[in-house]
Image (cartoon, rainbow, N blue to C red):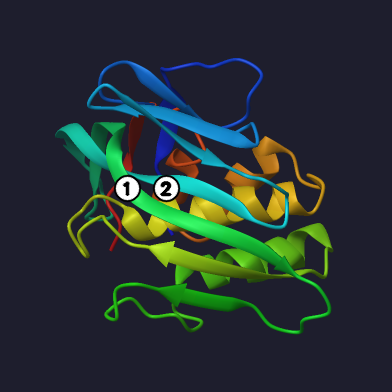
Amino acid sequence: MPMLKFLLVACCAGVGAAFVVPGGSVLLAGSPTLVHSRAGRVLRCAAARMADLSLFSPGKTNLFLRITRKREDGFHELASVFQALGLGDTLVFSKLEGATQDILTCNVKEVPVDGKNLVRQAFDLFRLRSGVREYFRCDIDKRTPLEGGMGGGSSNCATAFWAANQMCGTPATEAQLIEWGAELGSDVSFFLSKGTAYCTGPNSP
């Protein structure tokens, strides 16, 4: 799969993943409590315990998209800036003790909850790469438009990687999560970044 290369241009030291949202607020995904500001209000998604983790999963927009050249293989080299948004989904995660399969629910019936969903694929790949044999429940409160180009599925996937890693005692590094996320889609790596990224690479088939 042709991969996009990301150059992170927004930083937040020492907290793992962070998402910049409109108004200059920063959504921190490296602490047990996520905080972001929307319309002057501070919203908190607090994890009372690691077995019940509620996370905001932001959408994204392309601030610009430029074709830089046509390649000999017929693809085009692209350049773009991705920006995380304050619009997104809420995902609630739990670790299932003694379970042999994951559970996934969603408030939007058009969203598949079987193996086609990137959240389930993230859980499977996390177990494969980390060696951890835990299973999880994820309840998705979907707010991003389906197939609207905002990367909702990729964002959910990245959030699932981060949540699984946290609930299992962080067996994977941030760099490993980004690498594993890229196996499921180039946008997934962006959602494990700092919220703004300049990306280049060929368009996918």
Q: Residues within 10 Å of mark 1 (few under 14, many from 20)?
A: many
Q: Position of residue 132 (x, y in %)?
A: 83, 63
> Residue 3, can we see it?
no
Label 2 residue SS: strand
> Could you tell me the amino acid type at mark 2?
Ser
Per the model, the C-alpha gap separating discs 1 and 2 is: 5 Å
Quadrant holding the C terminus: bottom left
> What residue is shown at x 22% (from left), y 55% (from top)?
74
Q: Residues within 10 Å of mark 2 (few under 14, many from 20)?
A: many
Residue to which mark 2 is pinned: 57
Quadrant holding the N terminus: bottom left
Taking the image as shown, residue 98 lies to the left or right of residue 53, namely right
Label 1 residue SS: strand
Q: Position of residue 165 (x, y in %)?
A: 71, 50
> Residue 118, can we see it?
yes
Of residue 70 and residue 103, the one placed in the foreground of this image is: 103
Of residue 157 and residue 187, the one placed in the foreground of this image is: 157
Res 189 label: none
> What residue is shown at x 63% (from left), y 24% (from top)?
15
Residue to which mark 1 is pinned: 88
Q: Position of residue 131 (x, y in %)?
A: 84, 63
Residue 158 to residue 78: above or below: below
Residue 179 to residue 153: above or below: above
Q: Position of residue 181 (x, y in %)?
A: 55, 52
Total numbered circles: 2
> What residue is shown at x 79% (from left), y 54% (from top)?
168
Residue 126 to residue 25: above or below: below
Of residue 67 and residue 74, the one placed in the foreground of this image is: 67
> Could you tell me the amino acid type at mark 1?
Gly
Mark 1 and mark 2 in contact? Answer it, CB < 8 Å: yes
